[in-house]
Amino acid sequence: MSDIANVATGATVVALTNVHKSFGPLKVLDGVTFDVARGDVLCIIGRSGSGKSTALRCIDRFETIDSGEIVVCGRKVHDPALDLRALRQDVGIVFQSYNLFPHLTIEENITLAPTCVKGTSKAEAREQARAALAQVGLSDKIQHYPEQLSGGQQQRAAIARSLAMRPKVMLFDEVTSALDPELTGEVLKVIEGLAADGMTMVMVTHEMGFARSIADRVVFMHRGKVHEHGTAAVLTTPTTPELAQFLGTGL
Amino acid sequence: MGGSLNVNHLAFLANGALWTIGLSLIALVGGGLAGFVVALARISPLRAVRILAAGYVQLIQGTPLLVIMFLTYFGLPPLGITVSPLTAASVSLTVYVGAYLGEIWRGCIESVPKQQWEAAEGLALSRTQRMMRVILPQAVRIATPPTVGFMVQIIKNTSLASVVGFVELARAGQIINNALFEPFLIYLIIAVVYFALCYPVSRLSRRLEASQGRPRLSVETA
Ligand SMILES: Nc1ncnc2c1ncn2[C@@H]1O[C@H](COP(=O)(O)OP(=O)(O)OP(=O)(O)O)[C@@H](O)[C@H]1O
Ligand SMILES: [Mg+2]
């Protein structure tokens, strides 16, 4: 309960407490606890299958948890009576596969949710779309269809689409994994810009160099547990042999 | 009528052909509406609705259209509902086509990638908004070629309306043949007319299918 009080004061935006989650017999989250303060960037790293995506998806209730507590922007995510759509207005999520809507232009992709969900007027939503696209450096693509954009551009458009909802926290799940190094760079630059603007972010990433430069906190997940948790310094001087080994092979 | 094939006979056949087209359109519109409901019901979050819709589809797909025609035409009057041949044919085709189109369209809706649902969900769209604004527009594109293709089946199946006495193309041919006793000639004409109706539609379906595989621009995927 003290966590919830904390959230109410605005210091903590995301808090997971002793979260357990299984898919059938497979235990994926085994007592995960971490929190994210307002304006912080938390990077989740770890081997494939360690539960990173699942932890992230639980924050936006794309997965329901078996036990424990998740509080996001003062909302109890684990509560069955949660107002899901209110939660998802506070939380922006960007996936590895961009998932832009192929039948809509970039502008329509971005204005869809604000006009449908928030009742923003068309004109205002268009203005917001222009601003969001400027933020990700895609102003010239506003009337294009997703298939006319490169992977990196699509991913930046997906980020702009999320930003247009003015979320309080952004979740990124390996958003550069499908991109070659050059395109990765342009997406990471956008995320850096968001961090500089004070956006609270949780990102699952395999880009260790990037995590080192941007993360306020790092969570190393191993076998469904938070095996190591600290500042970006743990990426240079890990305290557990598992993280050391992960970094050794991961670099 | 009587004697040899004359212009009156041909006019009669033409009238039948018009009714074949009319019935096909009725079946497409009625069956389309029913199919839309069936497709949505098949993927409803409510289990009972899903089961009901699945039962309907199974039942209709396991029943010959001929039998459905008879059931509507002869089965409803004892219940106090009088039906004309046109009504019986329209209702039967709607019920029949609805089950098939519902099944085709359900497949199309489900073939829209799951990630599209998730992306829309992540943007806080309601279920209805996700369906109407994100999923259905994509499903419609996927559904167009098979739906047009199914139209060919509908056109041919309208010939079964003849069993309840409705005078469409096949029945018109039958009537003329009863007077002229020239089955080969008359049914050849009927066959040619059916072909003339169906061929453009199936050509269109194949064209749509071919053009769908081709993206507007090459997609760059890293
Ligand atoms: N919906 C699901 N049903 C069943 N098993 C699942 C499901 N989602 C994930 N899993 C399993 O849970 C485990 C953890 O998956 P998760 O996606 O969280 O790992 P990850 O750390 O993100 O891995 P990666 O780096 O490969 O993305 C994996 O073994 C995965 O196969
Ligand atoms: Mg993952």
Image: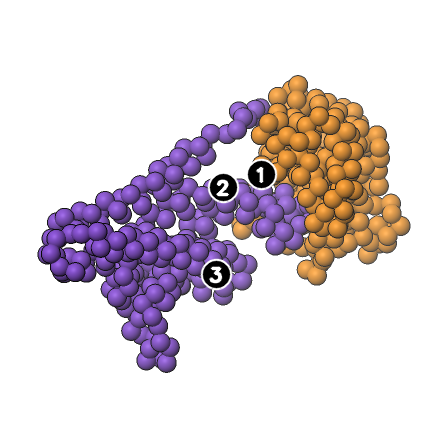
Residue type at mark 3 is Arg
Q: Is mark 2 within 8 Å of ligand 1?
A: no
Residue B94 shows in the view: yes
Q: Is mark 1 within 8 Å of ligand 1?
A: no
SS at mark 1 in the image? loop
Position of B68 with respect to A166 (left or right) is left
Give the color of chain A as drawn.
orange
- Which image quadrant is residue A32 in? top right
Give the mark nearest the N terminus, 3 or 2. 3
Tell us which disc is closer to us: 3 or 2: 2
The reply to whether the C-beta atoms of the residues labelled 3 and 2 are less than 8 Å apart is: no
Q: Residues within 10 Å of mark 1 (few under 14, many from 20)?
A: some
Q: Which residue is mark 3?
A: B50
Q: At numbered mark 2, what does the secondary structure look like: helix, strand or loop?
A: helix
Q: For the residue marked with disc 2, what is the amino acid?
A: Arg
- According to the picture, the residue beneath numbered tag 2 turns out to be B141
Q: Which chain is purple?
A: B
Mark 1 belongs to which amino acid? His
